[in-house]
Amino acid sequence: MAQAERKVRPSTLEPDLDNANGGMSKTKSFEQQLNRWLLKFVFVGDWMVRINGEDCDAEGKTVAEYLALADYDLRLIVVERNGEIVPKGTYAEALLQDGDVVEVVRFVGGG
């Protein structure tokens, strides 16, 4: 009788080839943090705020200040910072910091 294969859970330092996330192990977030740190201190020097996929020098500005400078219509947008929706009432207090990832989503009508 054939012995049943025992599925061994990989350590967090090895690739998880059976995982649905493209073979990345649970250390992906650690690896991303390490890469961000290396980029910030070794290669780039100053990390910037990434807005809609582009690096911007918006560190130290509030969301409201950035949106005003970029000429967004506040009635037609939603802002996401680091994976969380920023409530419109907090735009004036929400300070952008180095390493923030921001998406500004504009509503478009049509049919």
Image: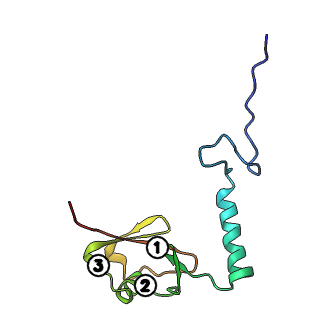
Between 92 and 2, the one lying in front of the other is: 2
Q: Looking at the image, do the residues carrying marks 2 and 1 touch, with CB atoms under 8 Å apart?
A: no
Compute the Cα span from label 3 to label 2: 14 Å
Tell me where residue 55 appears, x and y as whole percent.
54, 80
What element does badge 1 sit on? Answer: loop
Label 1 environment density (alpha carbons within 10 Å; few <14, some 14–19, many ≥20): few
- 1 lies above or below 93: above
What element does badge 3 sit on? Answer: helix
Kind of residue indicated by mark 1: Asn
Q: Quadrant of residue 92?
A: bottom left
The residue identified by callout 2 is 62
Compute the Cα span from label 2 to label 1: 16 Å
Kind of residue indicated by mark 3: Leu
Kind of residue indicated by mark 2: Thr
The residue identified by callout 1 is 52
Tell me where residue 93 appears, x and y as whole percent.
40, 82
Quarter holding the N terminus is top right
The residue identified by callout 3 is 74
Mark 2 vs mark 1: give the one in front. Answer: 1
Mark 3 vs mark 1: give the one in front. Answer: 1
Compute the Cα span from label 3 to label 1: 16 Å
Label 2 environment density (alpha carbons within 10 Å; few <14, some 14–19, many ≥20): some
- Mark earlier in primary sequence (3, 2): 2
- 111 lies above or below 17: below
Residue under the image location 69 percent in, 74 percent down:
37
